[in-house]
Image (cartoon, rainbow, N blue to C red):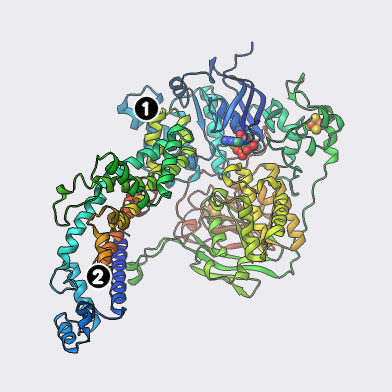
Amino acid sequence: MLIRRVLLGGVTVCIVSLIIFAGVEMLPGDACTQFLGEYQADEELLAQCRKDLDLNRPAIDRFAEWTQGAITGDLGLAADGTTKISTIVGDRLKNSLLLAFCAMAVGIPLALLLGVVSGLWRDRLPDIIASTLAIFAMTIPEFVSATLLILVLSVWLGWLPGIVLTSAAAPASEFFPEILLPVIVLSFVMCAHIMRMVRSSVIDVMASDYVQMATLKGVPYWQMVFRHALPNALLPAINVVALTIAWLLGGVVVIEVVFNYPGLGRLMIDSISDRNLPVVQSIALIVASVYVCVNLAADLLTMIANPKLRTMYMRK
Amino acid sequence: MPQSPFIDIKNLSVGYTSRSGKTIPVLRDVNLSITRGDSIGLVGESGSGKSTLALAAMGYFKRGLHVISGQVQFDGIDMLNIERNALQRLRGGRLALIPQNSGQSLTPNLRIGQQITEALRLHSDLPATSFDAGVIDLLSQVRLPDPVGLTDRYPHELSGGQQQRVAIAMALASNPEALLLDEPTTGLDVTTQAHIMELLRDLAKDRNLAMLYVSHDLGAIARVCNKVMVMYAGETVLTGSAKQVLLSPRHPYAHGLLASIPRLNETSLPQALDGRPPMPSETIMGCAFADRCKLADRTCYSSSPPLNHLETGEAVRCFHHDQIGQLNQKTEKSARSNPVAADKDTALSLANLAVSYSRPRLLSKLFALQDTPPSTVDRITIDIKKGETLGLVGESGSGKSTILKTIAGMVPAQSGNIILNQTEPLDTMVEKRPAAYLRQVQIIFQNPDDSLNPRHTVAQILAQPLRLYYGLSGTPLRDRSIAILEQVRLGEHYLERLPSQLSGGEKQRVAIARAFAADPEIILCDEVTSALDVSVQAAVLDLLDVLKRQDGTTYIFVSHDLAVVKAISDRVAVLYQGRICEIGPVAAVYSAPFHPYTDALLGAVLEPDPDVAPRLKADDAVELSPPNLGCPFQRRCPRKLGSICETNIPTAQEIAPGHIIHCHISQVDL
Ligand SMILES: Nc1ncnc2c1ncn2[C@@H]1O[C@H](COP(=O)(O)OP(=O)(O)OP(=O)(O)O)[C@@H](O)[C@H]1O
Ligand code: SF4
Ligand code: SF4
Ligand SMILES: [Mg+2]
């Protein structure tokens, strides 16, 4: 079962990479017409360039080489023919991971806490406040809330730097405190989604027969909540959390642009506008792999945490 | 000198606040007192407030409900004004509950052992070191096989009967003085039910318990209770000893309720109580039962009857309780539709059908290893005529539902054929069947919680088949939906409700309505009435019968309730472990000679008569898979002949035309 899921994930990544590769191949022009720009009319230069970049070999060969390289971490050269993609992307990936990790560290615990609290105190003050905020967070577009935050915290109060000026290659520690504002915005948004989900799941579970039974069995309230209600209420949250993590890692384009944060999302945008196709290809591949991995991890976790699924695969 | 009451509920009214801000009563001015050693049966239709009253005895009210007035005392303690910690110590301690639907009442993420240990830790003075021993002791007290192995299992790994026993064991952990039972055996096998009832009887006697037994199963009540209280629309309408209430009920509602129970010794359909109880939100002038009462006169509509205390010890809420005798003359048994003529066309034929859930592993498939377990269902050959009702009886795990699911295309057949209308093969799974076949075969499930989408309103649920097969929309759709709802005795105001806002009985009625909406040829009924009140059940049986006469609908009717199957079926097949034990016309199967398994089943049926005790022949052990060789019933058969039963498949003996028994015992000895 487990093996099948992993294989399936691998196949998904392969198919995605094939689609990415094929998509780029099918675009009119290639890396050389792009690189040479106005000089592309010069047949000789073009031929030389294609030879340099190995573009004359059949697509299948190049695809095989590309995937082989990708597996070993060598993503090849960018469209300028000199920079290694792994260096450019590597720095950005690190930055994206840093941002995602900080947002998760703040957002997930907060979301779980708020979700549980508002589920337990349903329709009472804590719930009303949290739920209203969540609806705001989900409906206001990110760039609006981001801009508002910059305006208030940075421009008016001057507490936090409004945009990130650190260069992409700088070590993680140099991003503080500039990273704080994007982290706040991101955790706010993700928190809202997870919290809504957890809240409704807590409400369902609190109305279930087994929670009523636990109460009528004499289990004190908090013990009932922690032993009987929450383990079951938080199960469905795993997948939502996974989706959010995938979203975070896949590059949160708008936020990165607004805060000038050097992450994958912005690199993607820049590469697209530069027609730097090899980089776009690589980023798409990375995002797809992250997506598959995170979902796989979530499914596994659900399987381990849910006795129904667990016993299905363990016993006999 | 009468003992002082142990559980004492005085003038209790409970209600909820409607959206318009009005307080709507669910219980009205109810009195109930139970002394130790007493066991009181609480009877009434779904929605009559039985569970609300039982839970009120624990000082518990479901979310949304609140006390309007009245008192609840337990051994002199005021349960409505008690500090939370003290209340939690009483609950599950001196006062324990065995819940309705124990499958859903056990916490899914905790092992059986953990859940019972929790009860011990909270309520017993056992030292922590002997909890494990305590758990095993409790599990064996409720006669569960392999108690040690069970402690490590999760609730979903047990059968319904086992879950129920676990719930009982959990309730006994604290050595309670009072037990509240909310439908503890509804939906269980007859044999399991009979054994659990005997267990409860013994426990009540040994421990001198005060017991409140909520059920709409009057057979079970007759077995364990010495007093009975009948509720209607949130009010007490009749109380008395079990004999008084069950044998000569003095209230027209109780009278009708008893008449609606299908009984083994009758061949006619039970009598449905017409109409439905008023909703809590309807304002009632006069007697709440008046709309459905054959004795009602003008007084009944203008003033509400008080609870009269009679010299016999009974209490009756009826102006005309002395005229109850008239009801017996006024009731004529509804006639059964005639059995179908033998020359009718075959609607569905099953030929040597076998179904297996175990998927052979790739390796054993490749090397043709013979380690596959015996098929779950095997050797099923039955022809069903148009307009015929075939009953399938047997305990849980006997493969009844599997056969239905295979016909419906939800489970693939391993071998054999299913043919609809003599020519149309139903050998593909449901996704590949043509739409015309799909409409013709409808299935109604046992548990409406699983088959109704919790996020769809009743209107949406009914609209699905009406849109899909008939393309209805707008007003015609709504009109048709309302007409169908009326057929299953639900009113128009149910259209906007979600399944969670319906009682268990109401939910099943919606599921039935949905199947009828497609106007199918064959309806596969999987335990469709086991969640229903007897009066509604009688109405549904009646409705099924009416439709059959109108359109010649064919039914395959699966139930573990032998009396229900008897009432509705033309022909019955008795199944054990997926094999047919006995098949024949209903009258022949329900009378001697019997297959040993049929005999055991019939003996376990609880009749709503306090003077009749069940005959328990076979034990109620749960078998997980059929034996490899020989007779499927060999492990539990009380009349097993010996090794021949273990090695040879019993031959079919034709006792009378169409009546076949599969057993090695020769015809004369059966
Ligand atoms: N939380 C609630 N809010 C509003 N109404 C409720 C609530 N719970 C139950 N009711 C209503 O109260 C009435 C009594 O419900 P109760 O569950 O006590 O019935 P019951 O006799 O136990 O029925 P069943 O046999 O189906 O279990 C029903 O009309 C039901 O619709
Ligand atoms: S009071 Fe009237 S309507 Fe009510 S049960 Fe008695 S006879 Fe029927
Ligand atoms: S064949 Fe043997 S085991 Fe089976 S029912 Fe008959 S006597 Fe019992
Ligand atoms: Mg109930």
Circle on res. A274: 2
Q: Residue furthest front?
A: A156
Give the image location of residue B146, x and y in percent: 39, 41
Residue at 48 percent across and 50 percent down: it is B635
Tell me the CA gap for discs 1 and 2. 69 Å
Residue at 69 percent across and 38 percent down: it is B279
Total label count? 2
- The verdict on label 1 being within 8 Å of ligand 4 is no
Residue A78 visible? The answer is: yes
> Judging from the image, what secondary structure is the residue with disc 2 in?
helix
Residue at 56 percent across and 25 percent down: it is B57
Residue at 32 percent across and 53 percent down: it is A298
Q: Is residue A273 above or below residue B321?
A: below
Image quadrant containing the N terminus of chain B: top right
Q: Chain of mark 1?
A: B
Quick one: B240 or B482, which is closer to the camera?
B482
Question: Which of the 4 image quadrants contains residue B139?
Answer: top left
> Judging from the image, what secondary structure is the residue with disc 1 in?
helix
Is disc 1 in the same subunit as disc 2? Answer: no
**Is B633 situated left or right of A188 in this image?**
right
Circle on res. B121: 1
Q: Chain of mark 2?
A: A
**Quadrant where ligand 3 appears:** bottom right
Give the image location of residue B75, x and y in percent: 54, 16
Q: The residue under label 1 is which amino acid type?
A: Arg
Residue B215 visible? The answer is: no
Q: Residues within 10 Å of mark 1 (few under 14, many from 20)?
A: some
Question: Which of the 4 image quadrants contains residue B549?
Answer: bottom right
Q: Residues within 10 Å of mark 2 (few under 14, many from 20)?
A: few
Quick one: B332 or A5, which is closer to the camera?
A5
Q: Is residue B34 above or below residue A59?
A: above
